[in-house]
Amino acid sequence: MFQHVKQAVSGAQILFVAFGALVLVPLLTGLNPAMALLGAGVGTLLFQLITGFSVPIFLGSSFAFIGPIIYSMQTWGMGATMFGLFCAGFMYFVVAAIVRWRGMELVNRLLPPVVIGPVIMIIGLSVAGAASNMAMGRAGGAQVMPYESSLLLAAISLTTTIVVSIFARGMFRLVPILAGVTVGYIAAAFMGAVDFAKIANAPWFAIPEFHSPEVNWAAAMFMLPVAIAPAIEHIGGVMAIGGVTGKDYTKTPGLHRTLAGDGLGVCFAGLVGGPPVTTYAEVTGAVMITRNFNPRIMTWAALFAICMAFFGKFNALLQSIPMPVMGGIMVLLFGTIASIGLKTLIESKVDLMEPRNLVIISVVLTAGIGALELKIGSFSLVGVGLCSVLAIVLNLILPMKSAAHEGIVEGQDV
């Protein structure tokens, strides 16, 4: 009995660490936070079933889909976006099948750092404008909150997040987003920027509102390439937790199983209207600090997340967070995502003096930041989706050494 209580407490601690990032994605994209909690909880349980309850991983909302979800919601609506997110899960199955068939060799050939790096950068940079507008209290081109108070709230939440991420120690260092939201929310309450009436009127128990997916292949084709980056990120996450626990999860239960489990979680989250799920570095950090390697604590974390999805007043509290508070955190968050892409290029020592690498990165960055759109009839591809396709195609068709570069080298040798 005591062992179960200890596991439950550890599971609650894991959810606390993952919570800030988990609910941030739906709050930024207009999805229901309750569905994010439900998707994360059920998605984690599905992952554990596929992997035989052997990997201590908790699946939370994926930041990679923030920009694409915002664009899809504005372009095709909620139902089509849900269908697109559901289809994105199948990209994990494709990568899992490739890993099962040919190992990581083919994955690395199709998706080397020169492809993954700039695509990750676009994931953050393509929505930088949305972060700045939210921090300034603007939405849809209109000033919906006073400019001065909005900037002040954004600065408070941003400063708190930075301070905690740099100066905090132990478990507190793992919750900078949660700290930033909490302090920003308290400041907003003192400034009269929080509507508590909705919280008071919300029921204690509430079944989350479900939306029906609408089949839309344009939205599906838009979302599918987006899943490439988080699928590769998943592989890194599995290797990271293996390094912490001292076990090689790439062999047992195998990368193909962990990828399939994550993909199944993404499919479920899309069907219920939540953001796609992915592995969390914060959770890996928590496991490393606590030294509790039992995968069952993730089961408890998942069960707590499911229960919280039906807590009406809590979800009303989340939806009452003022926009500038979220905007302040987004300024750091989206820049951090872009920095991870840059880190990928640096750590892999991608040679920018090599013309093919320079071409791939330049085209991807310009097309992504400039919102280049490919339209063929009713079908359109834009943002991360188009950038992923461009990067993969260019990487496959461009020679490793351009003729011009070889000519220069030969001329120097002469």
Image (tube, rainbow, N blue to C red):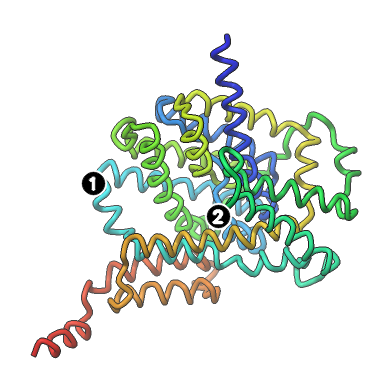
Which three-letter amino acid code belongs to the residue tagged 1?
Arg
Q: Which mark is residue 102?
A: 1
Q: Which mark is residue 65?
A: 2
Q: Residue 126 sits in which quadrant? A: bottom right
Taking 61 as reference, is 255 left or right? left
Q: Nearer the viewer, residue 372 or 252?
A: 252
Q: Residues within 10 Å of mark 2 (few under 14, many from 20)?
A: many
At x 57% / y 11%, what residue is drawn?
2
Q: Residues within 10 Å of mark 1 (few under 14, many from 20)?
A: few
Q: Counting residues from the N terminus, which is met first, the one under dot 1 or under dot 2?
A: 2
Taking 119 as reference, is 39 left or right? right
Looking at the image, residue 360 lies above or below residue 88: below
Q: Is residue 380 visible?
A: no
Taking 15 as reference, is 409 left or right? left
Q: Position of residue 308 (x, y in %)?
A: 70, 32
Query: SS of the residue at dot 1?
Result: helix
Which three-letter amino acid code belongs to the residue tagged 2?
Phe
Considering the image in quadrants, where does the N terminus appear?
Answer: top right
Q: Position of residue 311 (x, y in %)?
A: 75, 32
Q: How many marks?
A: 2
* Marks 1 and 2, how far apart at CA: 28 Å
At x 57% / y 26%, what residue is drawn?
10
Query: SS of the residue at dot 2?
Result: helix
Q: Residue furthest top?
A: 1
Q: Is residue 44 visible?
A: yes
